[in-house]
Image (cartoon, rainbow, N blue to C red):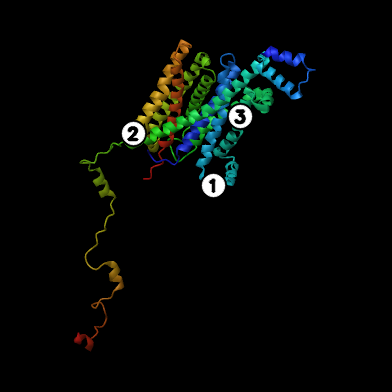
Amino acid sequence: MPESAWGWLIVTYLFLAGAGAGAFLAAVACDLLAPDWSKALARAGSLASGPLVAVGTACLVLDLEAGLWEPWRQIYLVNNLESMISWGVIVLSLFIPVAFVYAAGLNEITFVGRYAKKYLKPLEIVGSGLAVATAVYTGVLIAVVNGVPFWNTPMMPVLFFASAMSTGLAVAMLGAAVIDINTIRTLSNFALGHVIFLAVEGFVLMLLVFMSLTRSVEAAISANMLISGMLSPYFWILVVVLGILVPFILSIVEYYEYGAMPKLLVVGADLLVLLGGMSLRALIVFSGSPPQVI
Amino acid sequence: MTEEIKEKVQEEPAAETSVEETAQAAEQVEAAAPPTDEEEAANSLHEKRGRMVVAGIVATVALSLIALLVAGIFQLTSRLMVLCPTEPPVNDPAKVLWQAVTAEKVASSGLGVPDKLAVGASFKGAATSVAEPSADAGRK
């Protein structure tokens, strides 16, 4: 594995925070736009989003070793508002409680839920803005690193947002299947979401890789590492084939067959989306090549 | 059974039954009585909420497991990978030529006395008067 300044904790944060934010957006979209299709999907998405982003943020804090052993130093994280990192900390700090309160309100859990149920719409609006910011921030965190030219592109937040949406939808659909397996028939309606987000993800990923080949020497080294180098087996098998192409085709079939597809394949497509999402983040992090010193 | 207990509770309040026995009988009635629609709905809702919270926890655990799975795949298979050499060194003169170009060159020194030495030393021939050899020199 190539050496990288960032390790698995950051990769796990990127994956869990993206999936959590995407699950929140899927839940809100389902609750606002199609409440009759599947209540279970909205409930599962809302319940999963808070814990996922919280666990992901814990991974981010664990990676900050100085901040972990001397936690009072973390106040400096919000000290400089010109830094994107500071804004990321603020967004995460706001999104996690909002996600938990929204989940409690939508599912009427405890007295907090009974109270929050009265304010579901404002929670959905505020939470959606924060969820978009959280999903985009996972890409921004990578894109602001000037020292790694492969990451330093505005396409990175777009790629991470598209991936967050598809993985979040997969989480919500899997959760809905756990809550009520009979709802899996109505989940076919949401397969169109997978088709759209996986198509965008694949397109942006292709653009990122091929533009990197001509952007700079370092970016070309990273892109070559992905398409024909040391990381290429993971890239082609885990990300392109298993993470994008197979679920893309399965989602098209699921959408047109409307509930006739075996449940195992529906759940399998969602699991593959998650596998591909995690692998994509790992490959982006590990393929980041620093500037060459000549 | 339920009817009997109900009758016992309702028709014999004046009988010499203790308060404890009455309470026990009432509890039995409650336990044996079929749940009303409201109770059934509440129980069902309670059960559903339980399942929902479980779904949230399951989703988090499942995603963490997927993250671990991918990390495991990467860690295990990366040891099996053998990196192919991209620049075969066979008969490749590029490295030798590049070394020849970039190697530190030793400046060729001119014949005769080096400049530094010539400045710092005075020679016998250059002296104004030739010193006579001392007696000690003869002994040597």
Q: Is residue A185 visible?
A: yes
Residue that lies at the very extreme toward the right in this rendered image: B14
Nearer to the camera, B101 or B14: B14
- Where in the figure is residue A68, as x and y percent of width and height? 54, 44
The answer for which chain carries disc 2 is A
Say which element carries label 3: helix
Q: Which residue is mark 2?
A: A229
Say which element carries label 2: loop
State yes or no: discs 3 and 2 in contact (Cβ < 8 Å).
no
Marks 3 and 1 on same chain: yes
**Dot placed on the residue nearer the N-terminal end, 3 or 1:** 1
Marks 3 and 2 on same chain: yes
What's the residue type where badge 1 is placed? Trp
The answer for which chain carries disc 3 is A
Residue that lies at the very extreme toward the front in this rendered image: B16
CA neighbours of label 1 inside 10 A, class few (<14), some (14 to 19), many (20+): few
- Where in the figure is residue B51, as x and y percent of width and height? 57, 23
What's the residue type where badge 3 is placed? Phe
State yes or no: discs 3 and 1 in contact (Cβ < 8 Å).
no
Left or right, A252 with respect to A119, comes to left
Find residue A30 and report its image quarter: top right
Q: Nearer the viewer, mark 3 or mark 2?
A: 3
Placement of the C terminus of chain A among the 4 image quadrants: top left
CA neighbours of label 2 inside 10 A, class few (<14), some (14 to 19), many (20+): some
- What is the CA distance from the residue labelled 2 to the residue labelled 1? 38 Å
Using the image, tell me which numbered label, if any, was put on residue A69: 1
Q: Which residue is mark 3?
A: A100
Point 48% across, 12% down: residue: A259
Point 52% across, 27% down: residue: B58
- What is the CA distance from the residue labelled 3 to the residue labelled 1? 27 Å
- What is the CA distance from the residue labelled 3 to the residue labelled 2? 43 Å
